[in-house]
Image: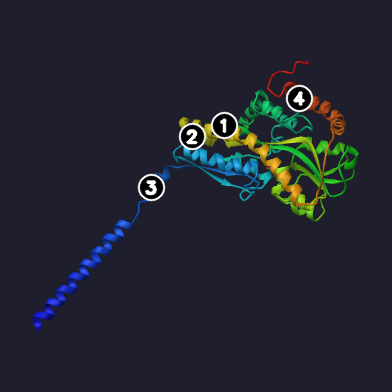
Amino acid sequence: MKVFIATSIVIIICFIFIFVGFELNNENNSLTYDYEQEDLSNQIVINFSHVVAENTPKGLAAQKFAKLTERKTNGKVKVAVFPNGVLYAEGEEVDALIRGEVQMIAPAYSNMSELIPEWLILDLPYIFKDYEHVEAVLNGEVGKALLEKLQKHNIKGVAFWSNGFKQMTSNRNPLRKPSDFLGQRFRIMPSKALEDQFRMLGVRTNAMPFNQVYPNLENRFLDGQENTISNIYSKGFYKVQKYMTISNHGYLGYAVMMNQEFWDSLPEDLQQKIQEAMDETTDWLFSESIAINQQQLELIKSSSDIQIYELTDEERQQWIDFFQPLYEEYGERYGEKWIQEIQKLEPNGIKDKRD
Ligand code: LMR
């Protein structure tokens, strides 16, 4: 009997050892190695702050740029995108970039005119004839010269991104001719040229940050605003406005910028890969932004009661003539050269034969 009990104990102990050994072995096998953590301490992170929604031209471009950069640098560079102004509001972004608190931003170029007044020219009403003209100007010598001017402010200008042409909306009345604006209050992006455009129309302006526009349209502090279809759609402005005029009077483009010191600290091969990712994104965005604005105009039409009016060619010419004095004023103040350079560019980037 004793022998039986002793044998049983030995067998049970053996089973326990075998079982525990098996489990330990299993546990070791299931400890998967996290390759993503490898070299994480050497990874370079670009924090990229912007103020619009993710389903907008800029929001989508930011995500595409992040993916391309990570792929092209084999994960050595990560782009962390912060949309919707969660890090900085519109008016705070440029200072945050200069101080190096973020590495990358892409504000509307209107935001740059306080730092470099020549940028105001891009906000003159009807300075751009059409999309091809926009591309020729921003990707040509004028765009290059404007980006270079950023360097003395510790900013590396990397590209111009596109959104689209701006349209006018109001709660008061349809906007067909310049006198229809008289006495209204509009929100503008911070730019002296936009302020002057509306001053000529007899409109009071508030240069408030983008994320404050909707509540102020809703509570009727503002009568109207100007923006692209994609911004009007993604922020729901069309839900709190009665009238929209397809005026295509101004262009919303973005200055894509990095902190210069940060850029200079990157190894040359990574700078090249990042610039490649940027160029690919910029090309893609140019046609994509046109498509997004067109699709979202259809969505606004099919899902709201806002009354949409498209300017006729004659009405458009009336607006162009109305704003002509602004060109003379800005030519004198900021140099004829810039305006002439832009006006001389044919859509394909060749000098206009009329001069
Ligand atoms: C605005 O303030 O309306 C725009 O700058 C927003 C944006 O970045 O598109």
Nearer mark to the viewer, of 4 and 2:
4
Judging by the rendered image, the residue that carries numbered circle 3 is 35
Q: How far apart are marks 2 and 1 (CA)?
A: 18 Å
Q: Residue 247 location, x and y as percent?
A: 80, 37
The local crowd at label 3, few if under 14, some if 14 to 19, many if 20 or more residues have their Cα within 10 Å, is: few
Q: Which mark is residue 279?
A: 1
Left or right, residue 267 beside residue 139: left
Locate residue 31: give its quadrant: bottom left
Tell me if label 3 and label 4 are in contact, CB under 8 Å. no
Q: Distance between the residues labelled 3 and 2?
A: 24 Å
Q: Which residue is drawn at 68% across and 37% down?
A: 290
Q: Residue 339 carries which label?
A: 4
| Sequence-earlier tag: 1 or 4 | 1
| Sequence-earlier tag: 4 or 2 | 2
The local crowd at label 4, few if under 14, some if 14 to 19, many if 20 or more residues have their Cα within 10 Å, is: many
Q: Is disc 3 placed on a helix, strand or loop?
A: helix
The mark tally for this picture is: 4
Q: Residue 266 carries which label?
A: 2
| Sequence-earlier tag: 3 or 2 | 3
Q: Is disc 4 placed on a helix, strand or loop?
A: helix
Nearer mark to the viewer, of 1 and 4:
1
Q: Distance between the residues labelled 3 and 4?
A: 54 Å
Q: Is disc 2 placed on a helix, strand or loop?
A: loop
